[in-house]
Image (cartoon, helix red, strand yellow):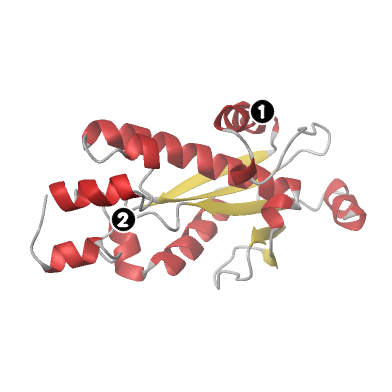
Amino acid sequence: MASRRAVSQAGHLVAGVDEAGRGPLAGPVAVAAVILDPARPIQGLNDSKKLTEARRETLYAQIVENALAHCVVMVMPDEIDRINIFQATMTGMCRALAALTPAAHEAWIDGNALPRDLPCAGRAIVGGDALEPAISAASILAKVSRDRWMVALDGEHPGYGFAVHKGYPTPAHLDALRRLGPCPSHRRSFAPVKLLVDQGVLF
């Protein structure tokens, strides 16, 4: 841990990368990349899933204000359906990293897989969102950004409860899906959405 931070402080810019929304039946997958500023540390960074919504919102504002660089990319349902959720996530990681200014020299990515087309060196870190502050920051930006997107989507497609379950396959969401059919923001390649589409139940 100490050696990694020393390298970062020496001018070797390291970006943390994480995603939110791989499992939902609707909405985009959000991917964030963050380069933290060692001179402006942010207290309380952690895996976004371990934080309350209020705490995530507070940290989101601090990350945006204090990070050297940050970017959030949304990969939309039609692209997810076209290339699958894994490839969509990998593509989002590359896009988020490529958009950073200044550019990262290295990317620390939560999980056990690295995209093939990374614009810099990469390291996969299992459980990194709870271990590395930069990845924690990315997980927070991705989660908050996606949650906000789903709240807005709830206004566009009322009745599904997107503002509450954020597109995850909860009993309430599955019930709404059966009653209303898929909306344009549902992922057609995900069961049980695919089942309804195959049956011709369309919004």
Mark 2 lies on a secondary structure that is: helix
On screen, residue 125 versus residue 31, left or right, reads right
Determine if residue 104 is in view.
no
- Residue at the limit of the structure toward the left, as seen here: 200
Q: Relative to 99, does residue 154 appear above or below in the rendering?
A: above
Residue 24 location, x and y as percent? Answer: 38, 54
Tally of marks: 2
Q: Residue at x 38, y 42 (%)?
A: 165
Assess whether mark 2 and mark 1 are in contact (beta carbons under 8 angstroms).
no
Residue drawn at (21%, 34%), measured in percent from left and top? Answer: 158
Q: Residue 157: which quarter of the image?
A: top left
Dot 1: element: helix
Residue identifier under label 1 = 62
Q: Is residue 30 visible?
A: yes
Position of 188 compared to 95: left or right? Answer: left
Task: Tell me which residue sits at (56%, 69%) in the image.
Answer: 115
Of pointers 1 and 2, the one earlier in the residue sequence: 1
User: As shown in the figure, which amino acid type bears the numbered disc 1?
Assistant: Gln
Name which quarter of the figure residue 148 lies in: top left
The residue that disc 2 covers is 77
Residues at marks 1 and 2, CA–CA distance in whole angstroms:
30 Å
> Which kind of residue does numbered mark 2 sit on?
Pro
Eyeballing the image, is 54 above or below 120? above
